[in-house]
Amino acid sequence: MQLYKKNLDDLRDFQLTAKNGKTMYGLNVFSQSIRYLKDAFLRHFEEAGFKCEKQDIRWVLTVPAIWPEEAISFMRKAAEKAGIIEQQMKICLEPEAATIFTYESESKKHLFHPGRKFIVVDAGGGTVDVTSYEVLKGKGLKELFPPSGGDWGGNRVNEEFLSLLGVLFGTDGLKEFRRSNSSEYHELEKSIEISKGMLKDDDDDTDFTLKIPSALWNMDRHRSENNNKSNEIIIEREGETYRIKRKTDKIRFSRKLAKACFKQPISCILQHLRSLLNCSTGQGIELIIMAGGFSNSMILLDAVKKAFPNVQVVTPHFQEGEAAWSVLRGAVYFGHGSNLIEYRRCKKTYGFEITLPYDVKRHGERQPVKVNGENRCFKVFKKIIEKNEPLKENETRTETVGIEPDWDGNLQFYASDKKNPVFTDEESSWMFGKIHVDKPFPKRSGLEIKIFSA
């Protein structure tokens, strides 16, 4: 699921569709999932004999870095609905957690020295989040780019494997199997996950083997008009011919075909990394840290190393296959107060809506509105901070808002994908919050607004 809508109200109201076709509000699904994890932890905590007051527990919720603020607010609401109060909760971006874990690991401390620039690739199942930092004097980090990435995670590889099974068993047959045998379908997904992790880039001599649930074989036999269905099919991929062999409870095909399933997501990852390394801000980056479950794949690691031979590529694990744990472990450090990021790049341009005297040079595309004999321009975007601007942790920005005689006391805050938006009703701008000032308004001509970075 992708939480990329800009309106938080839409996110609260959106519904998810289960495999059986039933729908449920997304907020309920997420809150119940968080509640289950919370209650399971408390139960195991007590069974282990530990004594602790619930109010002394700090909960850390990790989220993809490429999610907008509205999606992160949605997750915060879900956690609150699950019984975690705001004072006991912290939100941590997943690549930042991986960064903290790597930075705090004794075996990796030699990688970081003042002035060194590096990229963190948090490659999970759904998304790939990319962040980049420069090591400051002392212990802090400065973000070089706003978090970026896309839906290029390991699930895209799984989808390619499932498409091969669709050729073998029929797309409709696979859908029917998923609908009527959900537990066995889950086992099939696990089989794909395990098998794809065993692939290596230089191994083409033996066949790739994938275990198939017996329920799928049985369903296929009943669906087939000819029970003597061929045990071998031939398919074409990108001009090459491959054979897929059916044998008892498994299928086999060449490892070259299996590795082709990685091609599209890895291509997207490499293209994105290349764009970051080639821009002016990316000059001097000499280290890439690969975190997340997808980074356990040797196919992905080898592809990154080959694409960037002059950049050191490492994973933040103690032993093979533990790249997926870096986010979890880093979140624990984060929960204990280890926040290394001193400067972050702003994802969007932020400001509020004001009314100004009409300026034909700046507001020429709009018609002026006569107010008390003066030409005014409404819905003007007053910028507070610009997209990609570095913002220090706990930094304060102060702005003065002019108070109009007919002001209703509402101040609306806006975000924009542009660096220099002019109006709040542009396609790239949207309202994300507002504050209300009760009457009587201050007698002075302006209202001072202080905004703090979190």
Image (cartoon, grey):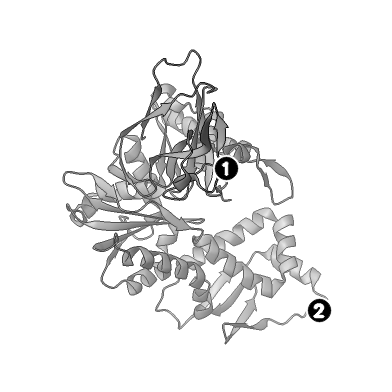
**Which sits earlier in the primary sequence, circle 2 or circle 1?**
2
Please provide percent x and percent y for residue 349: 42, 45
Q: How crowded is mark 2: few (under 14 residues within 10 Å), some or many (20 or more)?
A: few
Which residue is at 42% across, 68% downward?
271
Return the mark for residue 333.
Answer: none
Please provide percent x and percent y for residue 50: 39, 27
Give the amino acid type for the residue marked by disc 1 in the picture.
Gln
Name the foreground residue: 370 vs 445: 370
Please provide percent x and percent y for residue 159: 59, 65
Marks 2 and 1, Cα distance to the nearest angstrom?
73 Å
User: Which residue in the protein does label 2 denote?
Assistant: 226
Q: Does residue 240 appear in this view? A: yes
Q: Is mark 2 on a helix, strand or loop?
A: loop
Q: Residues within 10 Å of mark 1 (few under 14, many from 20)?
A: few
Quick check: 177 left or right of 46?
A: right
Please provide percent x and percent y for residue 409: 52, 22
Quadrant of the rendering where the C terminus is positioned = top left
Which residue is at 56% across, 49% downward?
427
Q: Does residue 192 appear in this view? A: no
Q: In this view, does 328 lie above or below 110?
A: above
User: Which residue in the protein does label 1 denote?
Assistant: 367
Q: Which of marks 2 and 1 is in front?
A: 1
